[in-house]
Amino acid sequence: MFVRSLQDAEANDHFVECGSGASHRLLTEKDVMGFTACHTILRANSLSLTQYSNHLEACFGIPGEA
């Protein structure tokens, strides 16, 4: 077992800034768990056009609209 905080993610390559927000990659393919987990915050009134050709993604919003 390991523990990775948001601050840990920001301190290395597990933190990604994008035009519409920022994502903390808490669990990645390199962790060899068979899935990934991210904490992503999108900026208000932003548009995010993404396409994933190698995996599926499940999302939920708290609070807000998507």
Image (cartoon, helix red, strand yellow):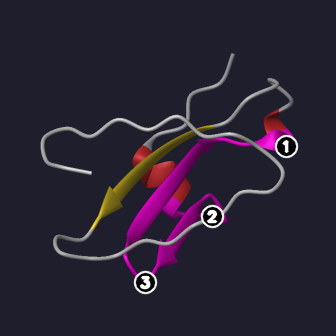
Q: Position of residue 66 (x, y in %)?
A: 27, 51
Q: Where is residue 5 in the image (x, y as percent from the top left)?
A: 46, 40
Q: Residue at x 62, y 58 (%)?
A: 14
* Residue 26 belongs to magenta span: yes
Q: Which residue is drawn at 41% across and 67% down?
A: 22
The residue under label 1 is which amino acid type? Lys
Q: Please tell me whether mark 3 sits on a helix, a strand or a loop.
A: loop
Instruction: Look at the numbered discs 3 and 2 and tell me whether their residues touch, using CB distance below 8 Å.
Output: no
Q: Which residue is drawn at 35% across and 35% down?
A: 60
Q: Residue 12 carries which label?
A: 2
Q: Which residue is drawn at 49% across and 54% down?
A: 24
Relative vertical location of residue 22 with respect to residue 40 in this rendering, above or below? below
Q: What stretch is highlighted in magenta?
A: 10-30
Horizontal arrangement in the rendering, residue 25 relative to residue 54 (left or right) = left
Q: Please tell me whether mark 2 sits on a helix, a strand or a loop.
A: loop
Q: Nearer the viewer, residue 40 or 1?
A: 40
**C-alpha distance separating marks 3 and 1:** 25 Å
Q: Residue 19 carries which label?
A: 3
Q: Mark 1 points at which residue?
A: 30
Quadrant of the image containing the N terminus: top right
